[in-house]
Amino acid sequence: MYFWGSFALFSLFLYLKNDQSGLYDILEDVPKALLPGVGGKKILNFWWKAVNVRQLFSEVYLVTNADKYKHYERWATANDFPVENIINDGTTTYDTRLGAVADLELAISSKKLHDDIMVIAGDMLCADQDFDMAQVLKFFRLKAGELAIYYEMEDWECTSTRGIVEVCPDTHRILHFFEKPQPGETTSRMASVVFYCFRKETLKTLQSFLNEFPNIEQRVLGRYMEWLINVVEVPVYGMKLPTGFQLIGQVGLADYTKWLTHYSTMKNEPKVKSITCRAYARIGIIGNPSDGYYGKTISMSIANFWAEVTISESKKLVLVPHPLNDPTEFGSLLDLFYISRKEGYLGGLRLLQATCKKFYEFCSEKGIALSKQNFTVKYNVNIPRQVGLAGSSAIVSATLKCLMKFYNLTDDDLPKSMRPNFILDVEKEELFITAGLQDRVVQVYEGLVYMDFSKSLMEEQGYGNYENMDMDSAPPFWLAYMRDPSDSGVIHSNVRQRWINGDPDVLEAMRLFAELTDQARSAMENKDWPELAELMNRNLELRRSIFTDSCLGEGNLKMIEIAKQHGSAVKLPGSGGAVIGLCLHPNKLMELKKAFQENGFVFCHIVPHSPVTAIVKEESPSGPR
């Protein structure tokens, strides 16, 4: 059973009596919760709509005083609110008020409530009226403690007027609560609002608080939360809502009109029509495949190929199949046979769906309440399939970028260092794709990236050290890949199991991959291309020694042979189906290209992608902006 309280017990009379304009005379005796809110509807109507969900709440109660009881009774009959659930605390003046904590205790004792409750101030303006109440309750149930809603204050808001919380980013437990802190007391700008969930066993502390604080000025919910968290040390967890709140009970007429205008302007601003984000293919230059084995790698995002995802607001949530990659119609059974044999059975639609599912799950677990906005999402990709250029992870990466921007998540909500882990979890946990972090790191950080996945780092912080290198350190690489990658070999073979078993040959190989990476970094920074070419060749031979040629497959071996015949350094940039190279003799490039093409392979010059030129497009109803 949940209890919903309105502690807007008095009107704006004290603030209106000095107003000479006459514009607000009609509001003189109106309780604050019944003042016009965003969109013109009463503030209380918004909250009643938010909690009037039988599947979520068994009962809803409202607390008022004797002076304003008739106002709320009239409101209740007009809005299908049960009049018998209005609780009159018997006070008629501000000086004789009970205080919000005492009103809450009165409601619980008089109605004999013996269940968890939700408490909301009914006179609270809310900027975004579409957040998901079910997600709030889900997070409360997930945590073994109380729940307090908070939001990030705007730059010009003053923290000394609000309850400020410091929240642990990992556990989401509120570490400290400051009721109207003094300057220098805390650097946090996370403002707690009168929006709480309490477990039934914690409600027993209300009377203890009232006994300890007889002063009416202290009997506010902010002081109670400060005492509960800082003194009693009851575990209270914080959930962030991506919106702003203002408690009208704390402001005068000028502030009320200012905030109402501000939030109404925000509501009426043209919404973003669509967001388009790209994630680029990548090549492993050195060190791979050691990223899943506590190794080191250097990789680079390339502008030749990319995945592009577009998300736009819509009435229903729609995932749009790609006409080529998610076929549902075929010319014939033979056509289905050839397409399925070459491209498999699953396209990019499953990647979109898995990312959206994981995104909602992440936000629910991390205490981030999303607005109830639906969207249509579609994708396009020109990364060749099954050639080890990270096409699947590019779709997931681009989708995550879109979702974060669509729901206004920031680096504080999902840090850049952790996004590769999120993307990898989508593929491994949702779709059972065998993969490592390398591809996802490069697609998040973009450009030329040095990655250290040392065991100590991974175990201590959950991710590696990732450093963007100077793009000028990248020499002119070339790329060749199979037109039909069906003969890409079983690249990973049993190496993973051998590594788990402590095979000394595999352990030594992974150590050497890391060593080659550090040497290659120095060579690139010094623009020592002959040294880099030698290191790439050694990387390839080391890989062949532990994976064996039978695992590489005939197609990969053929591409390697062509490169060597023309004096070019060569290695596999990913899991197979493509090779990259560094030709130290530019006059031989044309011959090299011709040889690849004559043998049925695709050849291209690699165009490095710099993060400075990342594609993120937004369009509003009035057009691009």
Image: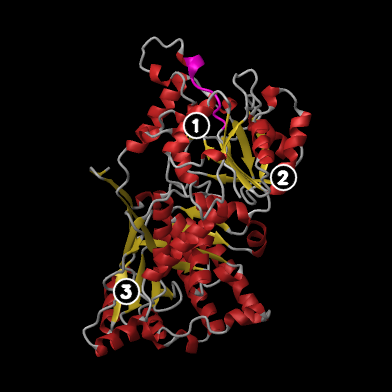
Residue located farthest toward the left when viewing the structure as drawn = 331
Q: Measuring 40% from the left and 61% from the top, which residue is drawn there?
A: 301
How packed is label 3: few (under 14 Cα within 10 Å), some, or many (20 or more)? some
Question: Is residue 263 covered in magenta?
Answer: no
Give the label on residue 52, or none.
none
Question: Is residue 12 covered in magenta?
Answer: yes
- The three-letter code of the residue at mark 1 reads Tyr
- The three-letter code of the residue at mark 2 reads Thr
Give the label on residue 202, or none.
2
Residue matched to label 1: 72
> Looking at the picture, how far across and down is residue 513, in whole percent?
57, 71
| Main SS, magenta residues | loop
- The three-letter code of the residue at mark 3 reads Asp
Label 3 sits on a secondary structure element that is loop
Q: In front: 388, or 177?
A: 177
Residue 517 visible in the picture: yes
Q: Earlier in the sequence, mark 3 or mark 1?
A: 1
> Looking at the picture, how far across and down is residue 221, in whole percent?
64, 33
Numbered range of the magenta stretch: 7-15
**Residue 474 placement: quadrant:** bottom left
Number of numbered discs:
3
Q: Nearer the viewer, mark 3 or mark 2?
A: 2
